[in-house]
Image (cartoon, coloured by chain):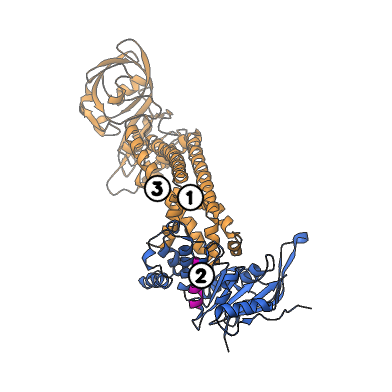
Chain colours: A orange, B blue
Amino acid sequence: MPLIFTLAARNLLHDRLRFIATVIGIVFSMLLVTVQMGLYSGFSYMVTTMIDHANGDLWVMSPEAKCFEDPATLDEHKRFRALSIAGVADATSVVIGFAQWKMPNGGTTPVFIVGSDLRASGLPPWNLVAGKVEDLEVPGAVALDRSYLDRLGISAIGARAEIRDQKVEVRALTRGIRSFTTTPYVFAPLERARAYTGMSPSKSTYFLVRLAPGADVETVRARLADSIPGVKVLTPAEFRDRSRSFWLLGTGAGAALLAGALLGVIVGTIIVAQTLYSSTKDHLNEFATLRAMGSSGSYIHKVIICQALLSAIVGFSIAAGIGWIIVQRTAETALPIILSPELTGVLFTLTVVMCVLSAIAAIVQVMRIEPAMVFTR
Amino acid sequence: MTVPVVEAIDVVKVLGRGAAQVEALKGVSLSVAAGELTLLMGPSGSGKTTLLSVLGCMLSPTQGMVRVRGSSTQGMGSEELASIRREHIGFVFQSYHLFPTLTALENVRLVFDIRGQRSKRAKARASEALAMVGLAHKTRSFPIELSGGEQQRVAIARAIAGNASAILADEPTAALDGENGHAIMTVLAEIAKNASRGVLVVTHDPRILPFATRIVRIEDGLIVRADRSEQRRAAAISGRREVSFGIVAQRKG
């Protein structure tokens, strides 16, 4: 084992209480960062979940629509114009909007209606755990997520309720289709979705365009934009960016999460810097001896950075373990914390950068050492 | 003629700033020759440690020159001076300055590690150095598990392991009892017999006079001739007819 590593590890472990305090500091700061970044990641995922699961190559929408949940409408006749454009295989209407759900016990709660032509496979419910999509063709049939049963005052598939004074029956249940707004999604066929939201039959929220085989997305998009006045045509990726941009940046929610993460990094950096600084101060004699023996400045830097990296690895490992448990616990909630392998890699890099930056104060202190001080101590 | 491994030529060293400024060395010339054990003696504050620091390339002279194996260190930066120390000079300190978290062997291996030598050969040479000072059986002991004399022997092993030309020792027996001090000086005297290596020992301890090949006295930043009684005493204890004494004071200006 290289002596640099041995020296660094033993210097750290020499004062175990201080090392434990450092690790706890790193764990807490990295947990804060992990939760904030995981929430950011989860939020980013949740705000685009409908776009991710829609079957379309292009979204036609009102230019005012800032995100998927924006109920700006389009005239239905524009869909027929879209269908007439070369390269368009299908254009399915999608209707969204808020409505009041009246529970069997008489209470009410808001729901978010998502409706599309189920035969055209525009935006049907997915992750079905009970019932089938076709079951929604039965008059009054709706689908919703099983996690909302209590919230909607019902207990199982087959339960009945009312939306806008119209009787509905739960004929299908999904798993994990939760809204970050906490308002439950209710899936229904297009016409009934219009009825539940009070939207005119001549209006829709989106047209979901599927391209004919071999058609070029950009060409068709340009044709749609040129031929249909007063609409915006976006690819799913662009619509995702638009939605994320609105929810994460436009509302300030993302900035708040990122600020929390930044706070975690700052706190972690200060804790590690303080520990490395005091550890270096305690071992100043040894660093002066190293210098007197003729060690280069970089050798001493490596010892200190190695201490920082060891702290980072131990702290991150524990934080990642706890983070993984939190991820499991929040998986079925309205706002799950998502830790992708990429995000885990970013967090590890962040921990390492944070710990190495923390070493700067200690390194500056060591570089002030006069090797001749070994004669006076 | 003996070959100087380290030499100071007309060295003036000013320490401190402003009102606290002190001329610690006032034009000192001293050479440490291969095959010799030189004792540098003098009262507290006479400039012994400053001279040791200058000869050991830890402090740069304000005026004058230091030469290590014939090459001047003038104008060298801190990293170049560190490189000179790494390759040519071994230090032995009064309070040992061993690394408490490393074993005896690891303490000696550090000499090679800082040179980037991490081979089995380096480890073997560290073991050999410990064997030379009689600590082959203590390689895995931590400093806290060793007596003061043993710790100082580890420090000597560390100083000689890298084949340094000059061993500079600062009061190596000050923290030891008579028996251990004698043992340490015996080891240093043995090291000085090597024709390619010179040893300079700064000391207050008159018990170690017999080990000297040469005695140099420094007072008030100047090297002066040692008094006759000291010379006679050293010669008598060592059983030699004569022990050569330091260079006559060289005062600048």
Whole-angstrom CA distance, mark 3 to mark 2, is 48 Å
Where's residue B160, x and y in %?
Answer: 48, 73
Determine the residue positioned at 38% across, 68% down.
B136
Whether residue B67 is visible: no
- Which quadrant would the N terminus of chain A be assigned to in this image? bottom left
Where's residue A316, x and y in %?
Answer: 40, 46
Q: Which residues are magenta?
A: B179-191
Give the amino acid at mark 1: Cys
Labelled disc at residue B182: 2
Parent chain of label 1:
A
| Secondary structure at numbered mark 2 | helix
In this view, the residue in front, A308 or B144, is B144
Where's residue B221, x and y in %?
Answer: 71, 71
| Secondary structure at numbered mark 3 | helix
Determine the residue positioned at 30% across, 19% down.
A150
Marks 1 and 2 belong to one chain: no
In this view, the residue in front, A357 or A146, is A357
Q: Which residue is mark 1?
A: A355
Q: Is residue B81 magenta?
A: no
Whole-angstrom CA distance, mark 1 to mark 3, is 11 Å
Q: Main secondary structure of the magenta part?
A: helix
A280 shown above or below B231? above
| Secondary structure at numbered mark 1 | helix
In this view, the residue in front, A154 or A55, is A154
Give the amino acid at mark 3: Val
Where's residue B222, x and y in %?
Answer: 71, 74
Whole-angstrom CA distance, mark 1 to mark 2, is 48 Å
A226 shown above or below A297? above
Q: Which residue is mark 3?
A: A314
Q: Are marks 1 and 2 in contact (CB under 8 Å)?
A: no
Which tag is nearer the camera, tag 1 or tag 2? 2
